[in-house]
Image (cartoon, rainbow, N blue to C red):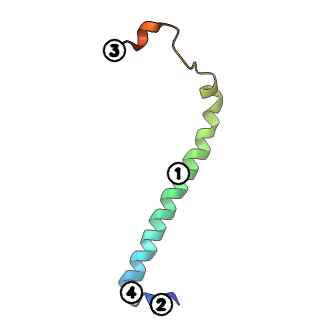
Amino acid sequence: MFKDIVTDDGAALQASVAFFVTFSVFLLIIIRAWRARRDDDHVAHLPLEEDSETSHTH
């Protein structure tokens, strides 16, 4: 069925490369998100606000 839609060999190659690139990007995002979860304990202990009021003057 796919060959009926795409008759040009170059278009099929281009679609395959685009799929591979998109899949690779999403896979890298998932891996980075999975590895970043290890730092949750460090981030959980960070203070939400500074103690001094002069640190945010503009």
Q: Are marks 3 and 4 in contact (CB under 8 Å)?
A: no
Three-letter code for the amino acid on which mark 3 is drawn: His
Q: Which residue is mark 2?
A: 3
The first of marks 3 and 4 along the sequence is 4
Mark count = 4
| Local crowd size for mark 3, using a 10 Å CA cut-off: few (<14), some (14–19), many (≥20) | few
Q: Nearer the viewer, residue 5 or 15?
A: 5
Task: Name the residue that disc number 3 marks.
Answer: 58
Q: Which residue is mark 4?
A: 9
Q: Secondary structure at mark 2?
A: helix
Of the residues under marks 1 and 2, which one precedes in the sequence?
2
Q: CA distance from mark 3 to mark 4?
A: 60 Å
Vertical position of residue 3 compared to residue 55: above or below: below
- Work out whether residue 47 or residue 9 is closer to the camera in this orientation and state it: 47
Quadrant where the C terminus lies?
Answer: top left
CA–CA distance in space, label 4 to label 2: 9 Å
Residue pictured at 45% horizontal, 75% vertical: 16
**Of the residues tagged 4 and 2, which is closer to the observer?**
2
- Discs 2, 3 touching: Cβ within 8 Å: no
From the top left corner, tell me how far across and down residue 42 is, in percent. 61, 26
Residue at the far left in the pictured view? 58
Placement of 19 over or under 36, stated as above or below: below
Which residue is nearer to you in this view: 56 or 6? 56
Q: Nearer the viewer, mark 2 or mark 3?
A: 3
Q: Which residue is mark 1?
A: 29
What x and y, as percent, mark residue 6?
A: 42, 87
Q: Which comes before the other along the chain, label 3 or label 1?
A: 1
- Residue neighbourhood size for the residue with mark 2, other residues' Cα within 10 Å, grouped as few (<14), some (14–19), many (≥20): few
